[in-house]
Image (spheres, grey):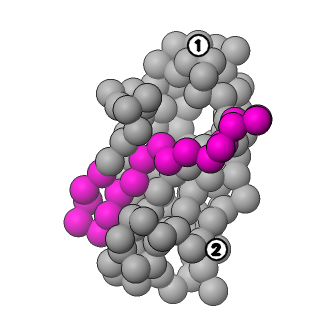
Amino acid sequence: HVQLVESGGGSVQPGGSLGLSCSITGSLTGRSCMGWFRQAPGKEREGVATIDSDGNSTYADSVKGRFTISLDNDKNTLLLQMNSLKPEDTAMYYCAADSRGSCESFGYWGQGTQVTVS
């Protein structure tokens, strides 16, 4: 049973920074791909960043150069460092895992953590 628990959300002024964490427990394969997604009120969920088992990362154009995704394997924790935050970054942020490693089929999701930039 895989469980993902996000933390680190909160309120910040534009231009500020926040760091999100996702605690990973359970039996994910070594080839798993991890990702951060977000959903703002009235909008569809969108991908923010992914990182595969080789450490390759991808980012949405809207966050490139501002957000950094990383995976601490020793602590089984997925991280998202968010800098230069903008009001449009306001959303519920979700951690997700794709146990097949394709970064295309995320079957495990956390409950989300709110980020508000204003």
Q: Is residue 76 visible?
A: no
Name, please, the residue furthest toward the right.
Answer: 41
Mark 1 belongs to which amino acid?
Pro
* Badge 2 density bin: few <14, some 14–19, many ≥20, Cα 10 Å: some
Number of disc labels? 2
Q: Residue at x 45, y 37 (%)?
A: 81
Q: Which residue matches tag 1?
A: 14
| Number of the label disc, if any, that sits on residue 3 | 2
Is the N terminus in the top left, top right, bottom left or bottom right quadrant? bottom right
**x and y percent of residue 47 in the render?**
50, 47
* Rendering quarter of residue 2: bottom right
Q: Residue at x 53, y 38 (%)?
A: 19
Per the rendered image, the range of residues in magenta is 39-57
Mark 2 belongs to which amino acid?
Gln
User: In this orientation, which residue lies closer to the viewer: 22 or 37?
Assistant: 37
| Number of the label disc, if any, that sits on residue 64 | none
Q: CA distance from mark 1 to mark 2?
A: 32 Å
In-image side of 47 versus 67 (left or right) = right
In-image side of 91 versus 80 (left or right) = right
Residue 13 counted in the magenta span: no
> Can you say whether 63 is above or below 5 in the image?
above
**x and y percent of residue 9 in the render?**
67, 39
